[in-house]
Image: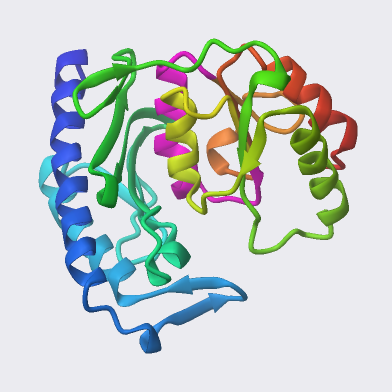
Amino acid sequence: MTPEALKQLCLHVTKVARSAGDFQLVEARKFDPSIIEYKGSNDLVSYVDKETELLITSQLQSLLPEAGFITEEGTMVTSDKAYQWVIDPLDGTTNYLHQLPLFSVSIGLLYKQNILLGVVYVPYLNECFYAWSGGGSWLNGEPIHVSRQTTLNTALVATGFPYSLLNKSEAYFSIIKEFVERTHGVRRLGSAAIDLCYVAAGRFEMYFEFNLKTWDVAAGILIVQEAGGKVSNFMGSEEGVIEGREVVASNGGIHPACMDVIESKWIS
């Protein structure tokens, strides 16, 4: 795929994400919380997640018929293709169901495990973040870049709480405690895709979380990287981060200091 073709495909995907977000806003006005489903403890899903995913996959199929799908809700799964759409139709479902405006549509495209493009749309704020490989990162048509802070004491940090802490709660909360004490503060927004985009836009200096999935992070990782940031696992390696097991995304400047905190406390 040529750079120009990739750019045009990315711009088409922003339209798909926006149409999905418009659907979510309409449904939010009339949503009945009594029909919430549970995939696990505190892991919620609704018909809005599923209908949004169907809307997205149907449109993406026509954009790139040779691509397969990796989707959170499993409405379309074809994992034997070189190109793979990776979709979280509603990242921040719990926020959505409680009428909090921080949720997003996340769409990434992989080619043999390399991220080619990423789009994250935040409907309530009408903010569409996107990037394609080699093309930089963008927000509503304007280029974005990570912040230039280089010290922890001037940083704002984001994190998330996994549905399962996998017996690692003591280590994880000790990391959070140190960041609370050594930075401008720690925020927990409830959408990994938004957290990553906020690092890319310079609103956060760093975001970390573990026990995520590929659809949570694929789009956002590329947006951070194309904005000049760095993404690694909790041991500092960049290998396999799109799988979401451990993600540390930063502006690059504070990455070594962040890793000093995390590596000293984390038990793999």
Image quadrant assignment for residue 128: top left
Specify the color scheme: rainbow
Relative placement, left or right, of 253 versus 219 is right
The reply to whether residue 7 is in sight is yes
Vertical placement of 233 versus 84: above or below? above
Q: Which quadrant, please, contains the C terminus?
A: top right
Residue at (67% x, 16% y) in the render: 254
Relative placement, left or right, of 195 versus 255 is left
Q: Which residues are magenta?
A: 209-229
| Front in this rendered view, residue 139 or 63 | 139
| Front in this rendered view, residue 51 or 161 | 161
Image quadrant assignment for residue 248: top right
Tell me where residue 149 appears, x and y as whole percent: 59, 13
Vertical placement of 264 versus 32: above or below? above
Tell me where residue 209 appears, x and y as whole percent: 64, 44
Vertical placement of 185 versus 224: above or below? below
**Is 176 colored magenta in this rendering?**
no
Q: Residue furthest bottom?
A: 34
Residue at (73% x, 24% y) in the render: 258
**Is 220 colored magenta in this rendering?**
yes
Tell me where residue 229 appears, x and y as whole percent: 51, 18
| Front in this rendered view, residue 127 or 47 | 127
Main SS of the magenta part reads helix
Residue at (34% x, 39% y) in the render: 108
Vertical placement of 40 versus 6: above or below? below
The reply to whether residue 239 is in sight is no
